[in-house]
Amino acid sequence: MSIQATLTNWLLRFTFKRECRGPVNVPRARHMVNKMAKRNPPVPKEVSHQPVPAQPGQGLCAAEWLKVTQPQTTILYFHGGGYFFCGLETHRPVCAYLAKHGQAQVLSVDYRLAPEHVFPAAVDDALAWWQALLAQGIDPANVVFGGDSAGGGLTLATLIAARDRGLPLPAGAFLFSPWTDLSCSGDTMRTQAKADAMFEPQALPQAAAFYLAGQPTDTPLASPLFADLSGLPPLMFHASEHEILLDDSRRTHAKAQQQGVQSELHLKPRMPHVWPTMVLLPEARESLKQTLAFVARVTGRSN
């Protein structure tokens, strides 16, 4: 375990995790992560940053492209944040990294957030962008979806919604510590509560309530663990052995395999939640290298 990861765990435990005690304060959470995002490194010179304003007439939320000059593949990325915070700026470093090192164009989607916009607003926004990319003539066989935490759950929900509508599916999807069970019923919600450096378990049901606004916690497009996963493209899961959402990855991976989906699960000990998005960590870069090898493999670009 790197010294960078050790320090990150310490910092998260004594800042972010402390904020998870008691009632969730939405404005405070948003302010905290947005302030942290101001310290993000600049986009690498090899990557262009192209904001895309919302297009309400076409049903499209805001987004941004991070792309190299001659991209070989497309990644449609959905950020995490419990469906109520984070956004394009917080996740720009990981999207830029994927673009640069994957020779890709990455579309990061600024889907609407709860509690102002409740389920299924995020799914509607994600699916609308997938339909827009298809309408632009992008080959789905050269596209991979990706997301972290709530964005990982949204990635799966978008795949399921696209399948159910008869839309073409991408070549695959990668998921960093996905939140797939908004009922928060996994055993690791309890067994890893102390070890998890980022979250207190009581914060997640509050976030789920913001998003669901009274709808059942096992609604399939909100909690993909409870969905039919058959017919989905290959999946890659990354999760920490010491996070409360570990069982979300383990159970969803197992169910995908049981239903005939190619799925792989990569676990690391003592890592914080969604560590692959923390690109300054050596462990993050290692996991992102594995992720980009998966992207190349499922899109037919690997040797």
Image (spheres, rainbow, N blue to C red):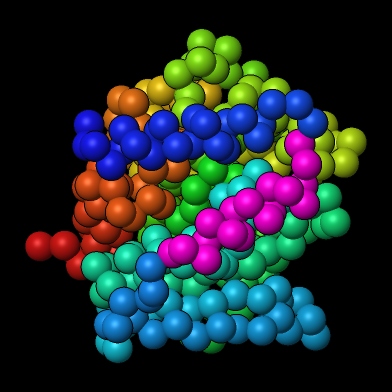
The image shows residue 181 at horizontal and vertical percentages of 63, 31
State which region is magenta: 24-40
Counting labels gives 0
Identified at 69% across, 26% down, the residue is: 21
Identified at 73% across, 48% down, the residue is: 28
Q: Quadrant of residue 2?
A: top left
Q: Is residue 88 above or below residue 264?
A: below
Is any part of residue 302 visible from this angle? yes
Q: In front: 216, or 5?
A: 5
- 28 in magenta: yes
Identified at 55% across, 37% down, the residue is: 15
Identified at 66% across, 84% down, the residue is: 53
Q: In front: 167, or 78?
A: 78
The image shows residue 177 at horizontal and vertical percentages of 46, 38
The rendered magenta stretch, by its main secondary structure, is classed as helix
Q: Quadrant of the N terminus?
A: top left
Q: In front: 94, or 145?
A: 94
- 11 in magenta: no
The image shows residue 31 at horizontal and vertical percentages of 68, 56
Q: Quadrant of residue 206?
A: top right
Taking 95 as reference, is 68 left or right? left
Taking 147 as reference, is 104 left or right? left
Q: Quadrant of the C terminus?
A: bottom left
Find the residue positioned furthest to the right: 214
Is any part of residue 156 visible from this angle? no
